[in-house]
Image: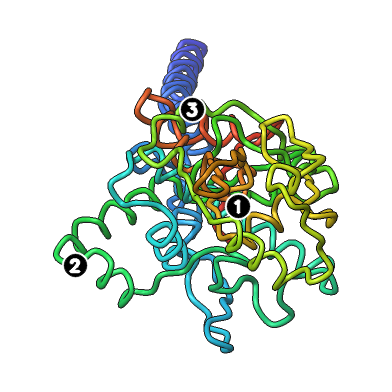
Amino acid sequence: MKAKRKNLQKRNKALRRLILAAALSALFFLLPLTVLTLTRPREEERETGTEIAFDDRDRLFDEATKVEVLIGGEVTEMSLSDYLVSVVGGEMPALYPKEALKAQAIAARTNVMYKKKLRAEKPAGASHKNADVCADSSHCQAFAPEEKLREKWGESYDEYLARIREAVEESDGVIVTYKGNPISAIFHALSSGRTESAEDVWGGGTPYLLSVDSPWDREHAKFETRVTLENEEFKDIFLAKYPDAVFPELAEGWIESVTRSEAGGIRELTVAGVTLSGRAFRNLYGLRSAHIEFSFGADGITMTVHGYGHGVGMSQYGARGMALEGKTAEEIVTWYYSGCETEKLKPPL
């Protein structure tokens, strides 16, 4: 009887050991799977290529963002992507290097986000009450719809459009910020070899629109232009705008008290007793910039002009030169916008 009890106890111990061994084996097998399951991305978060998709966040920012554009008195809503293609196509030559085109797209995108933020936070100070931007280049940015681009590019339309779209897509969502906020990313065609500060051109300091070197601009075929007017023609144009001006007998005494900016542009000058800004003088005579030198001779007054545009912010030709030297779009925009950084925005959900 005792022997039978001992055998039964032995069998129970062996059974318990077998159950314990099986449990431990199962634990060691399931534990890695449990950890893997806990650490594995959800289906919508799995890695796809080099990007992580989070729900709808794999969409392009520009395609997912809407912009309201005032065109011919009517507001049209479109994707930011389509808007930027029309802006970059209208603002910069399509054959410029890709990084220059991307820099232009970043500047244009930044301007939209700047104006959107202003419209949302300070409606009274917004450019337009019912729209984010307009299609007037003198007020917002140049906007060239498909028909204008087809007319402009002709047989090269498909090729050039592909270049512009590629630049927009490769810079998707990237903007320029100053202390975390989108900036007013002003740009111009060609500087005088150094950009102008916003304060010198328009008055009122903007901390990121300062004067910086832009030596690449001196290589442009039309970096320097000359306009010569006969003395009487010069007088007639001025008197039509300022009828109280009094011109001395000698032309050499007509222009006085010229003050210049750090970049060399005229801030202010006095003509026949009338004081006006360099910008107003430039517009009056239809000159390419306010960086003007005067000379007087038998043929009349010669005005030698350097650069093209107001000279503030990013020089488009300078962006071209930097791109040809291997600089990236981000390096270009942070060169021209002092103290700024670039930031990639996520598409809205």
Residue that badge 1 annotates: 110
Q: Quadrant of the C terminus?
A: bottom right
Residue that badge 2 annotates: 154
Q: Quadrant of residue 340?
A: top right
Q: Are marks 1 and 3 in contact (CB under 8 Å)?
A: no
Mark 3 and mark 2: Cα distance apart in space: 66 Å
Number of other residues with Cα within 10 Å of mark 1, as a class: few under 14, some 14 to 19, many 20 or more: many
SS at mark 3 in the image: helix
Q: Are marks 3 and 2 in contact (CB under 8 Å)?
A: no
Placement of 41 over or under 90, stated as above or below: above
Q: Amino acid at mark 1?
A: Thr
Placement of 157 over or under 277, stated as above or below: below
Q: Which mark is residue 31?
A: 3
Q: Quadrant of residue 49?
A: top left
Mark toward the start of the polypeptide (1 vs 2) = 1
**Residue 281 place in picture, x, y as percent:** 69, 56
Q: Residue furthest bottom?
A: 74
Q: Is residue 205 left or right of residue 314?
A: right
